[in-house]
Amino acid sequence: DVQLQASGGGSVRPGGSLRLSCVASGFIFEDYALGWFRQAPGKEREGVSCINTNDGAAYYADSVKDRFTMSRDKAKNTVYLQMNSLMPEDTAVYYCGAVRGIPTMYPEVMDYWGKGTQVTVSS
């Protein structure tokens, strides 16, 4: 069975940092691109970042560029999202998604989803 197990969420103050992890299983890691998405209450799910699992090239939404860094560990079938300089507007449930082929931040084309992890940024 395909599984995407996300973890690492929590509550932090503005300016703080968190590192999310997503462990993938049940498919060939290098055949899929993975992405991080988030959904705040009352809003649609949006793409945050995505990565080419083969060469590690990562792409970011403008709202998180220069603050978030996505990376992968092929040996562990895991992707990470290092989130720095967190702001209250980053508060959301964060999801890991996988799509066969090229990286994309369009949630509607994801083949697989993991359960989300809550990130709350508040003073």
Image (tube, grey):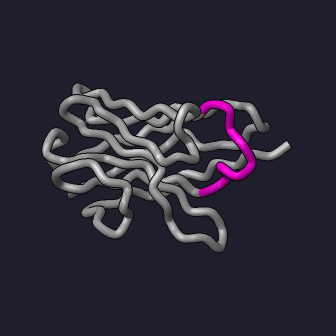
Viewer-proximal residue among 49 and 4: 49
From the viewer's perspective, is 69 left or right of 9?
left
Picture quadrant of residue 44 = bottom right
Name the residue: 29% across, 33% down.
57
Relative to 100, is 14 above or below? above
Viewer-proximal residue among 87 and 95: 87
From the viewer's perspective, is 44 left or right of 59?
right
Percent of width and height locating residue 118: 61, 52
Quadrant of image for the C terminus? top right
From the viewer's perspective, is 42 left or right of 8?
right
Q: Residue furthest bottom?
A: 42
Segment colored magenta: 84-92
Viewer-proximal residue among 76 and 62: 62
From the viewer's perspective, is 120 left or right of 94?
right
Residue 19 visible in the displayed image: no
Percent of width and height locating residue 13: 78, 37
